Amino acid sequence: MRSSLNGPLEYGLRVLVMLTEAYPQQLDINHLVLLDHTVLHTAELGGPPSIHPDHPLHAGELGVRRANVEEGLRVMLRAGLIDMQAPNTGIRYQAGDEAYSFVSGLASSYITELRNRTRWVVERFATMSDEEIRQQTTVIFRRRPADTGFTSSERQAEPWNG
């Protein structure tokens, strides 16, 4: 049996929260993968404390994150909470009509923290161009804890006043 931790439902829920916070913006898979990583590791970018703990190999998470985000999208598409659009620029996703009501009805400390982090990330990164996404992804892949000698909390560029 598959673990529900980091499974399609958890990825789908994070994607749904991201799309709800970014609404009415439509995001492609590349944006969603980068935003998903960033939402979990906000402290590295000067944001609020990270939801997931820092560890030496988390940059490698990007390698498997895309497939997991795609699975999560399928879960939320089947539930009718996410809409898929196919403009000339490629496939994009948007929060569906019921997404905000669904997310607003969720009550847990994890969801509250996730929504706070997602707002911070969407404000800063949701409008990135494809080239900026490629550059940021490269930065994440190259980042190693030994490069700086600092922990994630010491790498914060600015204090977070959430």
Image (tube, grey):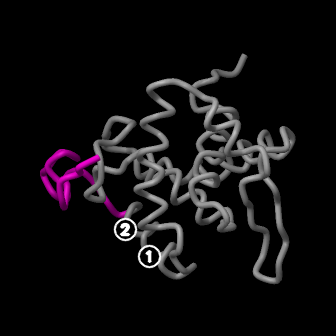
**Residue drawn 87% across the image and 41% down it:** 78
**Residue drawn 79% across the image and 50% down it:** 97
Kind of residue at disc 2: Val
Q: Using the image, tell me which numbered label, if any, was put on residue 49.
A: none
Q: Are marks 1 and 2 in contact (CB under 8 Å)?
A: yes
Q: Which residue is mark 2?
A: 139
Q: Label 1, secondary structure: give it.
A: helix
Read off the magenta span: 142-162
**Residue drawn 66% across the image and 48% down it:** 69
Q: Which residue is mark 1?
A: 135
**How many numbered marks appear?**
2
Query: Residue 98 falls in which quadrant of the image?
Result: top right
Q: Position of residue 22 (x, y in %)?
A: 59, 60
Residue 153 painted magenta: yes
Kind of residue at disc 1: Gln
Q: Is residue 125 left or right of residue 9?
A: left
Above or below: residue 127 compared with residue 39: below
Mark 1 neighbour density, 10 Å: few (under 14) some (14–19) many (20 or more): few
Query: Residue 5 falls in which quadrant of the image?
Result: top right
